[in-house]
Every structure is written in structure tokens, then in C-alpha cells.
Image (cartoon, rainbow, N blue to C red):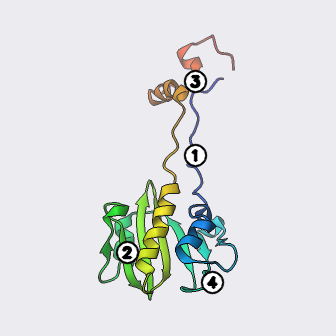
Amino acid sequence: MLVVGAAYAAPPPPDPCKLVTVAEMQQIMGPLNGAPTSTDPKSGEISCSYAPAKGPSFVEVTLHDGELAAWKKRNGGKNPVAVPEFGADAFINPDFQNWADLYAKKGGLILRVTMPKGAQSREAVKAIARKALARLWRRPRRRAAAAPCRRLVALGIASLDVVLPGLVQA
């Protein structure tokens, strides 16, 4: 039996260490102590940590799923600051547990950039988020050739033997 259409599995989330290059991070934060380190996605956390040689002790780029409004309610603090240049609901919590956190959503993922609170932390998390969001993927486009197959599947026709009985051999 020839099956029409293919199941589309969601692509794995991108590696957050590839959303901001080492050179870009150094341009924003200065020299780094070593290479960035990422968590194992199997742990349930998808993040990348950078260790600046001077200034804040860490910078973390993390990806989450869910709704931005829920994150804002939970982590927005008393006075979240809207950052509309990153999307309608994007915000910075300038003092969450003495950290500066920026949250923005692209596609189905929420980007969080975190570093310890400091004089330049707001501007730094914005600059890092700009770089990361530019590389954060959107849903991959499906090939045009698959469109007729998807239409058949949408009509409940899962194989050509339904359309052309006797012409397709199992």
C-alpha cells in the first residue's frame, strides 16, 4: 500500500548555544572564561550559560514552551517593563531574585535571557535577545510537492488504493 502524506514531527528545539555566537557574546559582554556550556535537553531544561571574565558572573540563554502571559504572571515581578520591540507581550523583570530577565516569544518558543542585576544589565539582555531571536527558527516550510498529498489526507484519503482501487498493489 502506498501511503499519501507523511507525519510531520515537530523539529527538536534549537541549541541555545547556537543562537548567540561566542564572538557576538564577547562583543556584548567582553571576554569570556571558556566556551559556553549547554544543558542536556533530556533534563527538561534547554539552556546555554556563558561566563564573562569581568562583570556579571553568568549570562544564560534559555528556551521554554508555554504562554508568555503565564511566565509574566509567575516571573514578572512587581514592575515588569514592557519591551514591545521584542513582541507584544515581551517584558523585562529588572530585579527577579537580583537578576535581570528578558522574556520574548517567537513561534512556539519563549526565549529568556538572564544575568545578575547590574548597571548595564537591561541593555545587555536586550542586545543578547536581539541576536538570539534573529536565529530562533520558525516552523519549517513544507515542500510544495506535499500539498496535494496533504489535501487528500485532509479529505480522509490516506492511501491511493482508496482513490484508485485495484491499481495500487499492497
Does label 4 or label 1 sit earlier along the sequence?
1
Foreground tag (4 vs 2): 4
| Residue receiving disc 4 | 53
Relative to 107, 164 lies left or right:
right
Residue 145 percent coordinates (x, y): 55, 26
Foreground tag (3 vs 4): 4
- The amino acid sitting under disc 4 is Ala
SS at badge 3 = loop
Question: Which disc number belongs to residue 92?
Answer: 2
- The amino acid sitting under disc 1 is Ala
Q: Is residue 65 visible?
A: no
Residue 25 occupies quadrant = bottom right
Residue 66 percent coordinates (x, y): 43, 63
- The amino acid sitting under disc 2 is Ile
Does label 3 or label 2 sit earlier along the sequence?
2
| Residue receiving disc 3 | 159
Residue 3 occupies quadrant = top right
Residue 164 occupies quadrant = top right
Residue sticking out furthest to the top: 166
Classed neighbour count for the residue bearing mark 2: other residues with Cα under 10 Å, few (<14), some (14–19), many (≥20): many
Foreground tag (3 vs 1): 1
Foreground tag (2 vs 1): 2
